[in-house]
Image (cartoon, helix red, strand yellow):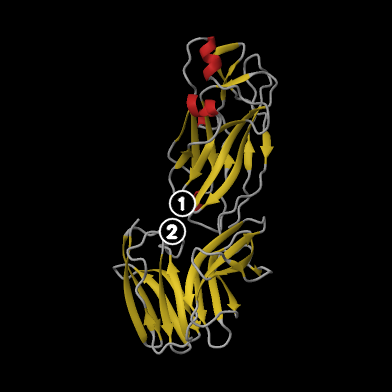
């Protein structure tokens, strides 16, 4: 479900003596941090006349299906001093997948007070910084943010920029005609999601590291990193990336074999995912003991930590090659996430759960059950998630 991320920017003409007033609206510095989408808004005057920002409203559309949030937050702490200290920048609850940004101009008494408090809209690129904003909780990791300016007339709640002109700073004017500038920035993809990461000592060829992605967007490939300590120095094990699926909304399975391990040594592994633009994200680490590869019995260990907040992990043992299925259930027995369902070699495995369901959405605080089934073996472990 790849959508083009287009920003439509509206420049308009004033109805007073400024017959060709224009401006450009820009969204820049788009980024994904965890499951939150961040972006910055700038306003630039493209007219040679001096324009001062009055109370205004900016309306944006976005791909609501890709988020669970019903609000957008302004992120404080950066930006132009006058905007931060003089203007009130607020957001309203999201309605009909529209983000509404309200700009309230400061009050002023005389010309000196006006000059000190009211911001002159910049004519330099990228313009005056309005603020940084955040849409929380990405739910569809195979989509994009899909931001676009909603630019119909103010009478139907579209983007409405108001300004004070230099010759009459006491009167605010609305920019209402149809001169516009289009800007099409690079698409901002939402993140790759790895749903499982395993490491197991095999009978023949050392340590096998395997992982599964729920979805991929603009992914180039993967690197495997190893350390002898969790917080130690990690070594990249493969010089060439393991090719990924690129763009996929379905599960993809990957594996890498580390043949240079010593029996009795504990190792820590991370997976680095590299995008087609060169950006990278690390997943893990997980630990595994390079020990006798064949256990005597089936087993499923308790999860640790328990209770947990962001994630928990567990180990399981398979004494012979078997079809293994491990899933997470609610107290009422409803399955919410399948972690493993495949045939696996005899050995010891480690796996984790990050507190999400099959669609990648975070599940609420509560008690959940982890169940393992393999060749007539069945075992359940209880775990508690605290948000």
Residue designated by label 2: 361
Q: Quadrant of residue 220?
A: bottom right
The label on residue 347 is none
- Residue 81 lies left or right of residue 355; in this view the side is right
How many numbered discs, if any?
2
| Residue at horizontal 66 percent and vertical 17 percent from the top | 18
Q: Is residue 84 above or below residue 248?
A: above
Q: Secondary structure at mark 1?
A: loop
Q: Which residue is mark 1?
A: 137
Whether 173 is drawn above or below 260: the answer is: above
Taking depth in this image into account, of 357 and 39 the one nearest to the observer is: 39
Q: Position of residue 111 (x, y in %)?
A: 54, 10
Question: Residue 85's x, y, as percent?
Answer: 48, 26
Q: How many residues crowd around disc 2 within 10 Å: few (fewer than 14), some, or many (20 or more)? A: some
Q: Secondary structure at mark 2?
A: loop
In contact (CB < 8 Å): disc 2 and disc 1: yes
């Amino acid at each position: 479900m790849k959508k083009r991320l287009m920003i439509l920017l509206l420049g308009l003409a004033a109805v007073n003596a400024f017959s060709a007033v224009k401006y450009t609206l820009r969204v820049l510095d788009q980024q994904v941090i965890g499951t939150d989408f961040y972006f910055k808004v700038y306003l630039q005057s493209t007219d040679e006349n001096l324009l001062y920002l009055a109370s205004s409203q900016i309306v944006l559309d976005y791909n609501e299906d890709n988020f669970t949030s019903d609000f957008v937050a302004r992120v404080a702490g950066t930006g132009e001093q006058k905007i931060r200290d003089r203007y009130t920048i607020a957001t309203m609850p999201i309605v009909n997948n529209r983000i509404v940004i309200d700009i309230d101009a400061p009050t002023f008494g005389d010309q000196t007070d006006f000059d000190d408090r009211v911001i002159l809209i910049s004519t330099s690129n990228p313009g005056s910084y309005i603020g940084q904003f955040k849409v929380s909780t990405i739910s569809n990791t195979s989509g994009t943010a899909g931001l676009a300016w909603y630019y119909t007339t103010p009478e139907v709640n579209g983007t409405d920029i108001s300004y004070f002109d230099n010759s009459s700073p006491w009167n605010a004017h609305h920019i209402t005609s149809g001169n516009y500038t289009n800007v099409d920035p690079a698409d901002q993809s939402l993140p790759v999601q790895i749903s499982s990461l395993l490491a197991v000592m095999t009978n023949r060829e050392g340590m096998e590291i395997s992982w599964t992605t729920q979805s991929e967007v603009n992914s180039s490939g993967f690197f495997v990193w190893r350390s002898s300590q969790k917080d130690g120095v990690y070594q990249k094990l493969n010089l060439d990336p393991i090719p990924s699926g690129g763009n996929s909304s379905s599960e993809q399975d990957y594996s890498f074999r580390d043949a240079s391990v010593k029996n009795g040594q504990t190792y820590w592994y991370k997976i680095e995912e590299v995008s087609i633009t060169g950006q990278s994200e690390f997943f893990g680490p997980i630990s595994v003991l390079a020990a006798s590869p064949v256990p005597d019995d089936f087993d499923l260990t308790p999860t640790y930590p328990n209770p947990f907040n962001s994630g928990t992990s567990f180990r399981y043992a398979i004494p012979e090659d078997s079809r293994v299925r491990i899933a997470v259930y609610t107290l009422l027995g409803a399955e919410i996430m399948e972690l493993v369902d495949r045939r696996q070699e005899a050995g010891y495995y480690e796996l984790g759960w990050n507190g999400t369901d099959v669609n990648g959405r975070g599940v609420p605080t509560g008690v959940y059950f982890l169940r393992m089934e393999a060749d007539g073996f069945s075992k359940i472990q209880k775990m508690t998630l605290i948000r």
